[in-house]
Image: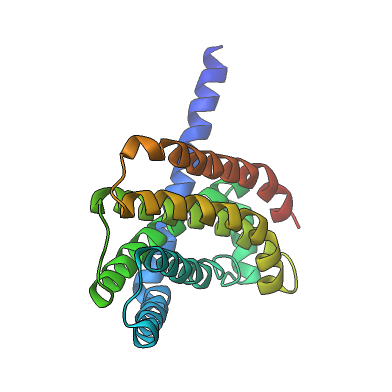
Amino acid sequence: MLKTAKYVSLWYMSFFQQVKTLVYKDLTLEWRSKYAINSILLYVVSTVFVCYQAFKSVDTQIWNALFWIILLFASINAISRSFVQESQYRQLYYYAIASPKSIIISKVIYNVILMTVLSVITYVIYSLIFKNPVGDPVFYYIAVLLGAISFATVFTMVSGISAKTGNNSTIMAILAFPVIIPLLIVLITLSQNALQGMDRAESYNEIGVLVAINVITITISLLLFPYLWRD
């Protein structure tokens, strides 16, 4: 019994050490190149500015929907290259030194960090250019963070699957569509409640759905990715 407990403890220590090292590697590479941050910043600023020039002013519902559309495409651009950017030789090296579960979890954590930063920047820029009509700013910010985490988990899983195919962008769009549509509906409903300043208790169901989607997505990633990684 003690040997089993010791083995499990060592396995968890090794797993978390692998995840920590891989996340640190991704953050270091991103800090050196700043490719994702700079490209998404350019996309966000230009898109918001074009929308402002086209609409000048919008009502609250359009303001909310437009924000999530911009954040959705920003997340696609940021996360779609999670596995594509890794060369075949680097993937072989990872295969030799780390478990597939630690690789997919590290990618999820890195993309959550990346999307959290990008979502905050997008929200600030969007609020500065368009007049901010949010009735409950704190709760709307929570909705933005939940959306960033949800986009990160879903697109990381889809990116890992599509990276093993020849047509990555097409496969990613096809696989993500059935998950993203209900996810967007829940996020828009949640953020609309915060926009109108409604009682927060009325949004607990939407928060529960978002948490459930994230848990299911991460579970599927842990079950499916090891089989994809072997190929």
Front residue (pair 62, 86)? 62
Q: How many marks?
A: 0
Q: Is residue 13 left or right of residue 34?
A: right
Query: For residue 16, what is the image quadrant?
Result: top left
Query: For residue 180, what is the image quadrant?
Result: bottom right
In the image, residue 84 sits, relative to residue 108, either above or below, namely: below
Residue placed at 32% from the left, 50% from the top?
194
Quadrant containing the C terminus is bottom right
In the image, residue 43 sits, relative to residue 154, either above or below, namely: below
Residue 118 percent across, percent down from the top left:
36, 66
Residue 72 percent across, percent down from the top left:
49, 66
Q: Is residue 142 left or right of residue 167?
A: left
Residue 106 percent across, percent down from the top left:
49, 52
Residue 230 percent across, percent down from the top left:
73, 53
Residue placed at 38% from the left, 53% from the top?
191
In the image, residue 223 sits, relative to residue 106, either above or below, namely: above
Q: Is residue 15 left or right of residue 174?
A: left
Front residue (pair 14, 109)? 109
